[in-house]
Structure formats: C-alpha cells, structure tokens
Image (cartoon, helix red, strand yellow):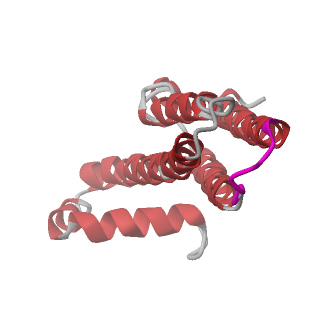
C-alpha cells in the first residue's frame, strides 16, 4: 500500500480519529490482526460517509433552480427537477444502507488486502464523480425566460449523469465477485 493511495489516506484518517487505545491493542498478535482489517472497514465507512455527503450537497442547488421557477411563476417548469432529487436520495440511501460497503455484500467474504485497496480506489473514483456532478449542478444559470425544452434537456442530461453514477456504484460488487 503506497503512502499516497486513497486507502492509506482513509486508514491514516481512521488511526488519527481513534487514538492510543487501538495502537496499544495492535501490539498483541490477535488484536493486531483484527484491528488491521478493522481499519479497512472503518476506512470504508469514512469513504461512504464522505460520498453520501457529496451526493446530499447536490440537492440544494437543484432546489434553488426549482425555487426560481416558483418565483418566476413558471408553471410549466415547476416540478421538473423532482425526478433528480428522488434519484439522488435513492443513491444516497444505497450508499448509506447495507447494500453498499463492507457491511453489506462484502461481509460474507474474506476480502484480501488487495481487494480492500481496490474497493478504496473504486470509492475514490466515485467521490471524484460526485465532485464532477456537483460542478455540473452548480453551473447552469437559467435566465427567467428560459425555454421548457432547455430545462428538459438539462434535466435529461443530468439524469443520464446520475444513471452513470448509479452504474458505477453497482459495479463495485464486481471487486468481490471477481468478475
């Protein structure tokens, strides 16, 4: 594991948060081996929390767009972004819930260190994808007289981006299934 890899960053972050008790217990052979894997589980938890927060931050700019439609009394556009909010909420729940992470699919398997590192790399790419989504959701600055087709095209485009993110999220299990 290299010192600048995403997994090492999350493991060191976990170590910094947990303090001296874990370092004392890691001296004992049995506890040391248990804690070694525990670090990866905690690093996974930290990565999932970070990812869910990034996705949650996408909702506010979408709500602001919707508020502008209400403020401008654009009845034909009100509610057009609701589908994006529901997709973001579903993705966030998948990340937080048991269907994602080592507390879900991976618990039944004994993951090797290389598999755990591959998961961390995957999570790291998902975090970057979430940051790209954040940039895209903040970039549109629709004028008050924007056309319905322009809004629908933007919503459709952003929904495609969310669907790509969903596919990448579902592809994470392939690390365990060795596909």
Magenta stretch bounds: 141-148
Q: Is residue 131 left or right of residue 47?
A: right
Decide: is 166 above or below 67: above
Residue 44 sits inside the magenta stretch:
no
Q: Position of residue 170 (x, y in %)?
A: 67, 30
Decide: is 78 above or below 117: above
Q: Is residue 126 left or right of residue 156?
A: left
Q: Position of residue 125 (x, y in %)?
A: 68, 55
Q: Quadrant of residue 143?
A: bottom right
Q: Is residue 130 left or right of residue 20?
A: right
Q: Position of residue 81 (x, y in %)?
A: 62, 35
Q: From the image, which quarter does the C terminus lie in?
A: top right
Residue that extends furthest to the bottom in the rendered view of this protein: 3
Q: Residue at x 78, y 35 (%)?
A: 152
Q: Quadrant of residue 43?
A: bottom left
Which residue is more in the foreground, 17 or 22? 17
Q: Position of residue 159 (x, y in %)?
A: 73, 35
Which residue is more in the foreground, 95 or 101? 95
């Amino acid at each position: 594991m290299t010192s600048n890899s995403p997994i090492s960053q999350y493991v060191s972050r976990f170590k910094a948060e947990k303090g001296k008790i874990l370092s004392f217990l890691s001296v004992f052979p049995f506890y040391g081996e248990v804690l070694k894997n525990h670090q990866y589980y905690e690093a996974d938890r930290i990565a999932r929390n970070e990812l869910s927060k990034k996705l949650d931050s996408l909702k506010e700019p979408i709500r602001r767009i919707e508020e502008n439609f209400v403020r401008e009394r654009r009845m034909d556009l009100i509610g057009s972004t609701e589908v994006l909010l529901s997709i973001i909420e579903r993705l966030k729940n998948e990340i937080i819930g048991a269907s994602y992470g080592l507390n879900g699919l991976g618990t039944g398997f004994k993951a090797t260190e290389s598999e755990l590192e591959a998961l961390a790399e995957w999570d790291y790419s998902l975090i970057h994808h979430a940051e790209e989504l954040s940039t895209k959701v903040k970039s549109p600055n629709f004028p008050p007289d924007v056309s319905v087709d322009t809004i629908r095209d933007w919503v459709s485009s952003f929904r495609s981006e969310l669907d790509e993110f969903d596919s990448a999220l579902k592809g994470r299990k392939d690390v365990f299934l060795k596909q």
